Image (cartoon, rainbow, N blue to C red):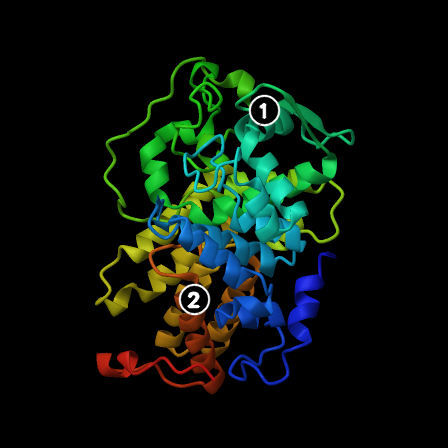
């Protein structure tokens, strides 16, 4: 199916639906996703979700939620990015046979491929299968990152179980990169940073590779093994990790956007009909040190005494600095909007809230995962309306609690 087929399908049935979301920036796909009307994006998705529940995905733990929630989240991001239907369905089942990072085999490749083909379609199932039987760490971090491009002839890599050759075309490698971008963006938050320590920024030693561990290493994304393309400078010893880190930790935003910026830049070297809109379609490459600086400035604001109004000016300064370092964060814009509303600066509040909405729609997921994407979107739109109406910020807490209606 063409990359924009999901958008066309939704538009065809949009006339009488979702009247509360009227801004032109909200595509019909975005409206349907915010309404949790999955069938309007892909009529097979309700059945596929029921199949995942039948197989127990709703009971399995996954990072900051359940496995089913994560799979749905990846599908939502890919759908909002208007990726081909087969790739979006792959996102919905992307670890279902288990893979080189996580042992969550709710389907068995030896017996269930026909069932998954019937459910998802042959093209999507082929993607699901291939992505589950190759070593993403080796392909992306150890091979493609040093090359700084995707070879036109593709790659032939070993099957992680049998060692047989598996050929991945340049187009399929591009799909692998895009799916991994969505996978990482949906799941990564500060707990993984605490868990892996500096190992998050380097490849695993060969002796502890996912292939040698026979699929038992429960680290579902290559972001947890990221590096900075300076492999020759890395020391050849086991990195320090912290496996006794208590879950879920403080739930700071994760340091994953640097890695995703590398994936997006690499994807630009692949044939692709629709590129993910994030990070200027892969033109913006984020430095990992800068990402930490921006995140820490944001977290300083979050950690301030919320009762102290005198902190507002300082918080505006810190949030502005964070966005100067990393302009692709939505949530600091949301906090800025509220700060400006408290000060009565309606034009600045309007600009900040407007940019936050745009960035939330670009990512399709939230960076600060303490609350949901939908909650961030709803609160940001409340602030946007407040700024549009030039309504003075509330002088008591009951007025704030009374907020909520989105027109």
Mark 2, Cα crowd under 10 Å, few <14 / some 14-19 / many 20+, is some
Q: Quadrant of residue 311?
A: bottom left
Q: Is residue 368 visible?
A: yes
Dot 2 lies on which element?
helix
Between the C-alphas of marks 2 and 1, the distance is 39 Å
Q: How many marks?
A: 2
What residue is rendered at 28% in x and 30% in y? 243
Residue annotated with mark 1: 159
Q: Is disc 2 in contact with disc 1, using a CB cutoff of under 8 Å?
A: no
What residue is rendered at 36% in x and 44% in y? 63
Residue 308 at x, y = what percent?
23, 66
Q: Quadrant where the N terminus lies?
A: bottom right
The answer to whether residue 400 is left or right of residue 164 is left
Label located before the other in sequence (2 or 1): 1
Residue 180 at x, y = what percent?
55, 42
> What is the number of the mark on residue 288?
none
Q: Is residue 230 above or below residue 48?
A: above
Q: Is residue 139 above or below residue 324?
A: above
Q: Quadrant of residue 84?
A: bottom right
Mark 1, Cα crowd under 10 Å, few <14 / some 14-19 / many 20+, is some
The answer to whether residue 60 is left or right of residue 45 is left
Dot 1 lies on which element?
loop
Q: Is residue 20 above or below residue 84?
A: below
The answer to whether residue 356 is left or right of residue 54 is right
> What is the number of the mark on residue 374?
2
């Amino acid at each position: 199916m063409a990359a924009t087929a999901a958008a066309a399908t939704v538009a065809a049935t949009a006339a009488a639906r979702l009247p509360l979301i009227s801004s032109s920036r909200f595509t019909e796909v975005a409206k349907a996703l915010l309404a949790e009307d999955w069938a309007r994006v892909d009529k097979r998705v309700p059945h596929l979700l029921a199949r995942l529940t039948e197989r127990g995905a709703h009971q399995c733990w996954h990072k900051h939620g359940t496995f089913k929630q994560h799979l749905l989240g990846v599908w939502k991001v890919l759908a909002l990015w208007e990726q081909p239907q087969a790739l979006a369905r792959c996102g919905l089942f992307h670890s279902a046979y288990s893979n080189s990072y996580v042992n969550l085999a709710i389907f068995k490749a030896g017996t269930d491929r026909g069932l998954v083909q019937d459910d998802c379609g042959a093209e999507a199932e082929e993607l699901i299968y291939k992505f589950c039987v190759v070593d993403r760490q080796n392909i992306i971090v150890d091979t493609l990152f040093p090359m700084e491009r995707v070879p036109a002839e593709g790659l032939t890599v070993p099957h992680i179980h049998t060692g047989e050759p598996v050929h991945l075309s340049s187009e399929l490698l591009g799909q692998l990169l895009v799916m991994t971008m969505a996978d990482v963006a949906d799941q990564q938050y500060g707990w993984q940073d605490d868990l892996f320590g500096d190992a998050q920024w380097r490849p695993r030693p060969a002796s502890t590779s996912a292939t040698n561990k026979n699929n038992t290493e429960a680290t579902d994304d290559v972001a947890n093994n990221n590096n900075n393309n300076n492999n020759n400078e890395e020391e050849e010893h086991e990195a320090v990790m912290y496996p006794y880190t208590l879950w879920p930790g403080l739930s700071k935003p994760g340091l994953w956007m640097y890695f995703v910026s590398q994936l997006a830049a690499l994807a630009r070297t692949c044939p692709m009909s629709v590129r993910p809109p994030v990070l200027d379609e892969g033109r913006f490459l984020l430095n990992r040190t800068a990402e930490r600086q921006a995140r820490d400035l944001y977290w300083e604001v979050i950690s301030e005494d919320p009762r102290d109004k005198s902190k507002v000016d300082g918080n505006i300064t810190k949030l502005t600095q964070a966005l100067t370092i990393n302009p692709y964060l939505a949530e600091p814009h949301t906090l800025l909007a509220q700060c400006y509303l408290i000060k009565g600066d309606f034009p600045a509040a309007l600009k900040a809230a407007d940019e936050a909405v745009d960035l939330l729609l670009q990512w399709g997921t939230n960076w600060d995962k303490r609350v949901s994407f939908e909650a961030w979107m709803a609160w940001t739109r409340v602030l946007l309306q407040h700024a549009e109406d030039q309504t003075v910020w509330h002088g008591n807490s009951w007025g704030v609690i009374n907020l909520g209606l989105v027109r």
